[in-house]
Amino acid sequence: MFFLGSAYPMGKFGLNADTNPILFGALRMGIVFLCLIPFSNFKVPPKKYFLPLIGFSICMGAGVNMFLYLSLDAASILAPVTIGAQLSIPFAIILSSLFLSESISFKKWILIFTSFLGIILIAFDPKIADEISATLLIFAMAFFYGLSQVFSRHLKELDVKFTSAFMGLIGFVILIIISQLFEGNVIGQINSIDKNGWIAILYAGMIISIFGHTMMFYLYKFYPVGMVLPFYALFPVFGLMLTFFIFGEIPTPIMVTGGIIVVTSVFLLQKTR
């Protein structure tokens, strides 16, 4: 959770080095693909996995990374973005109900409602007036993350390294094309990235995407998902702590209160059947 929470301040650190956000996401996915090639057994999976694998790769590799870094680029303060990312869990549960016909108990609906109330409370903070675009973009990121979890339910039998490498390849291709179209001159952009930008990109690709997520998948081998998932509520805590140490940003009382409501709701949501 420390590594996953560090994605937000380290992403902002890299973007502050004049790295374009969509290119940042593309290079992160490219690094994931290159690092996993030696450990992946590339073979054509059965046809039943084609659609969920492509859907997962587009949502997680392209959608999540594009909207995450666009949000960080638009944000002047990171607390709302870091806390808002927690909505990926309620979105995942709602989308699972819609597409996988999974039932949602009354208790879960209450917790989903309170998690959104926490975000609404944060929106009343005067400092959020200039953060509307960043907040909406992180909502889009949370939606794609939730949708990617729906697709991932159909990929449990595939090798995790292959799935992650394929996601990295698809995410890189899509985002590099979008970057060329909207940010322009990809080659020139890459050549102009400075040391701090590359440190942040390499950290995001190698530490967060590979090392952090691998540790989570390792836990899934020994513990039930319901025991591991609640710890996701910790990543905004570490994210906010690192934001303070790197940028000196102190959340306002309204942000802290709303954040506690969101994190607590998400924690209980993942423990409730």
Image: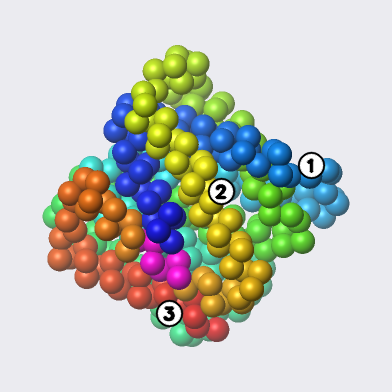
The magenta stretch is 231-236
Q: Is residue 226 visible?
A: yes
Q: Is residue 98 visible?
A: no
Closest to the observer: 127 or 69? 69
Amino acid type indicated by mark 1: Phe
Tell me the mark number nearer the camera, choosing from 1 and 3. Answer: 1
Give the side of residue 210 with respect to residue 21, left or right: right
Q: Residues under labels 3 and 2: Cα distance?
A: 27 Å
- The quadrant of the rendering that contains the N terminus is bottom left
Amino acid type indicated by mark 3: Leu
Q: Which residue is mark 1?
A: 42
Amino acid type indicated by mark 2: Ile
- The quadrant of the rendering that contains the C terminus is bottom right
Residue 199 in the image, given as x and y percentages of width and height: 40, 34
For residue 210, which numbered disc appears in the image?
Answer: 2
**Residue at screen point 71% across, 44% down:** 39
Coloring basis for residues:
rainbow
In this picture, is 115 found above or below 236?
Answer: below
Q: Which residue is mark 3?
A: 268
Most common secondary structure along the magenta stretch? helix
Dot 3 or dot 2: first in sequence order is: 2
